[in-house]
Amino acid sequence: MEIKTDGSDPMKETALDVLMYLFEHYQAGEFADAGNQDTLHEELVAAGFPDDAVRQAFVWLDGLAAQRQLPIVFGPSGATRLYTREEMAKLSAECRGFLLYLEQLGILDAALRELVIDRLMALKEEIDLERVKWVCLLVLMNQPDAEEAFGHLEEMVYYEGEFKH
């Protein structure tokens, strides 16, 4: 993602736009480390991102790090994931279908799916399929031992085009 120079309103940039920019321009360790956040915050604001969107992006990253520390408790394997009313309102059938597709491919397991859903629900913006893909990439990038799954998803996002049912 590049900073918009087409005359569009830079104040419409969202936290996910900031996260996507970080993903494309920095190493994961550079923006995941809380010690670098002040410097990165200044760089991002200087690059044209609104201060509020940058703050929200770092809160989102902190939430991702905090979620990794929680114990994982799940029911029987093979159980169907039922979405809450709030999740269904925010995540379209296409988005939910994509998450199921990633599970069926073995890119996401139940724990990572729940982490992705948590991080999607934490965004204060409208969610579409493209944003789901980016959140999945960001979550996988921050998981130890998920390099292979990350590589498969990255290839899907960048090279295989749009997800089709």
Image (tube, rainbow, N blue to C red):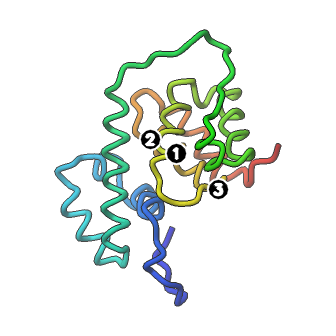
- Mark linked to residue 51: none
Mark 1 in CB contact with mark 2 (< 8 angstroms): yes
Q: Residues within 10 Å of mark 3 (few under 14, many from 20)?
A: few
First along the sequence among labels 1 and 3: 3
Q: For residue 128, what is the image quadrant?
A: bottom right
First along the sequence among labels 3 and 2: 3
Residue where numbered disc 1 is placed: 137
Mark 1 in CB contact with mark 3 (< 8 angstroms): no
- Mark linked to residue 128: 3
Residue at the image position 47 percent from the left and 43 percent from the top: 119
Which mark lies nearer to you, 3 or 2?
Answer: 3
Q: Residues within 10 Å of mark 2 (few under 14, many from 20)?
A: many
- Mark linked to residue 141: 2
Q: Amino acid at mark 2?
A: Met
The kind of secondary structure element at disc 3 is loop
Q: Amino acid at mark 3?
A: Asp
Location of residue 9 with respect to 60 vertically, above or below? below
Q: Amino acid at mark 1?
A: Leu
